[in-house]
Amino acid sequence: MSALRAVSAPSRVAEPAEGISTEELALAARNHGLPLEALRYEVTPPGLHYVLVHYDIPTVGAGGVDDWTLTVRGRVRNPLSLDLATLRSFPAVTHRVTMECAGNGRARLTPRPVSQPWLVEAVGTADWTGVPLRTLLAEAGVERDAVEAVFTGADHGVERGVEQDYQRSLPLSDATADDPEVLVAYEMNGAPLPPQHGHPVRLVVPGWYGMAHVKWLRDIALTSTPFTGFQQAVAYRYRRSADNPDDPGEPVTRIAPRALMIPPGFPDFMSRTRVVRPGPVRLEGRAWSGHAPVTRVEVSTDDGDTWTEAALDEGLKESSWAWRSWRTTWEATPGTHVLSARATDAADHTQPLDQPWNRGGFGNNLVQRIPVICLPPGD
């Protein structure tokens, strides 16, 4: 254990003048976000959907998917061992789901938690096809004393000195709910899952941050006691104290509301500062929440001093856990402007104007800020 700890540093917060490290740059190269102009796609192409891989992308095995099995065991009456053909024999459903990394926005916090340096792009929306988890649990027969379902992926590594397979759990009430309905998914946008998105099978938990959507799923175990593995009890907790790393915090669960704007005009290569010309400029984007459907999006063109309501599309009735598009028109005038958008959901959660700081950098849904230069007339 001491040798593992020597290569696996504890969590920490960056010093005030500390820049992004080589290690963080390496993480950023492995884990890409959604190019914000790709918000134009209602369904995100798999190669543009955000990716977060904790360890290595695992291989299925020498025999390919023919070697893969999913086990359902623990506090069940009829343990299951399912190959992909058997899994596909169950009635399939498709859900359109917006997925967001719990660390989205981490790099915008001050002080900055040291980890994957997300800005605002760790999001995507896909059509996921598979078998409802509750169908498989009904087939296995849940024992009365079961309280949680523990999901184990095939990815293996070390984190903060702890060697582990990636594991997360859900309360049984969430695992068996019909809305949102948890999926054991084997297709993304009508095709087999790509390797980086969990091939051959992954979990999809609508409304929850991405850490719950266990990829490369190989085992489901029902337990009579709450799961206390690393990714549940140590990682993915809202710890508000900067000075007390032992603060147990609160668990990260559902996605906080967020609106993102497609950056208007055209960008400078290095700074990504946007350039527009005077006159009417279409502003548009997407908004979502894991608590309830988004009911309002407001837009500011003066760095948050004033806000006006944007038009919000109706959304698909069968896709209540997917983002909604919004739009408005801005009359651009020469000079420098900062554009923002903020979302409010039906449960009255609204994006904050001040950062919601925590040691892990989770759930930072502070409003987006887009610097824009409007050129003089004729330039």
Image: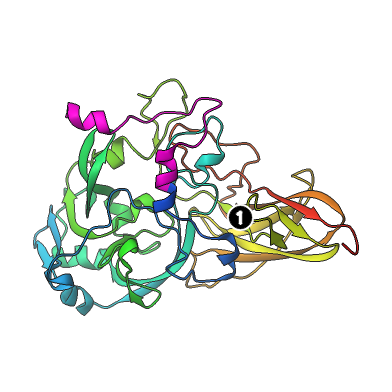
Magenta span includes 144:
no
Picture coordinates of residue 174, whole percent (x, y): 33, 54
Residue drawn at (15%, 67%), measured in percent from left and top? 68
In-front residue for pair 78/256: 256
Colouring rule applied to residues: rainbow
Residue 182 in view (yes/no):
no
In-front residue for pair 14/357: 14
Residue drawn at (47%, 38%), measured in percent from left and top? 361
Mark 1 crowdedness (10 Å alpha carbons): few <14, some 14-19, many ≥20: many
Residue drawn at (61%, 47%), measured in percent from left and top? 350
In-front residue for pair 375/239: 375
In the figure, 366 relative to 318: above or below? above
In this view, the residue farthest toward the left is 78
Picture coordinates of residue 36, whole percent (x, y): 58, 60
Quadrant of the rendered image containing residue 276: bottom right
Picture coordinates of residue 62, whole percent (x, y): 12, 68
User: Horizontally, is 58 left or right of 269 in the view?
Assistant: left
Query: Which residue in the structure is indicated by mark 1?
Result: 259
Magenta span includes 19:
yes
Element class at badge 1: strand
| Three-letter residue code for mark 1 | Ala
Residue 376 in view (yes/no):
yes
Magenta part of the chain = 1-27
